[in-house]
Amino acid sequence: MSEDYGWVADTMKKTVPWVATMGIEFPEVAAERVVAALPDDDRLHNHIGGPHAAQIFGLAETASGAVGIASFAELLGRATPLVVSSEIRYRKVSAGPLTAEATLSRPAADVIAELDAGARPEFAVEVAVRNAEGVTTAEVTVLWTLKPHKK
């Protein structure tokens, strides 16, 4: 039986105002994989007619955050997910609507075990940003940590 992660999209839209402002949708959400979608908006185009680099990065980072929330929902009462670092590699010029497929790079159980052992675990989320034809236009790695709450 698969778990329903529809609440992740609602949480992202309510807690991160930028997500709702940009119109990001979440057509697929699972524990260790999320697809986020950015609609094309002429008002937000850059000097070459596509989404600004900040939007491309924002879409990817949003998808990676949704993976973290879905994967570690049960831990949010005792740890806060925070970005440690990010790297983006632009592969092709982006135009039109985009999707970002984010995947947890290692099993969530391993990250949880580190937290349970008293460590401040880090985990990477790999993101492929694609245009409407399915061509990868950017690749992003977002390194996250789970910062334990102070007791």
Image: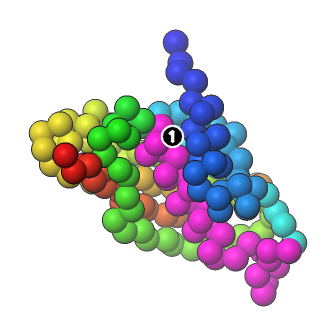
- Residue depicted at x 79% and y 74%: 44
For residue 110, which quarter of the picture?
top left
Segment tinted magenta in the rendering: 43-70
Q: Secondary structure at mark 1?
A: strand
- Residue depicted at x 35% and y 38%: 77
- Residue depicted at x 49% and y 52%: 65
The residue that label 1 is drawn on is: 33
Residue 54 location in percent, x, y? 62, 75
68 sits left or right of 129 in the view: left
122 sits left or right of 71 in the view: left
| Secondary structure character of the magenta stretch overall | helix
Tell me how many marks there are. Answer: 1
Q: Is residue 76 depicted above or below 102 in this figure?
A: above
In this view of the protein, which residue sits in the foreground, 133 or 49?
A: 49
Residue that lies at the very extreme toward the top in this rendered image: 1
Q: How is the image coloured?
A: rainbow
Q: Could one spot residue 128 in this view of the protein?
A: no
54 within the magenta span: yes
Residue 3 location in percent, x, y? 53, 21
For residue 6, which quarter of the picture?
top right
Classify mark 1: residues with Cα within 10 Å, few (<14), some (14-19) or many (20+): many
Q: Could one spot residue 87 in this view of the protein?
A: yes
Q: Which amino acid is tagged 1?
A: Arg
64 within the magenta span: yes
Q: Is residue 89 depicted above or below 19 in this figure?
A: below
Residue 21 location in percent, x, y? 73, 61
103 sits left or right of 82 in the view: right
Residue that lies at the very extreme toward the front in this rendered image: 151
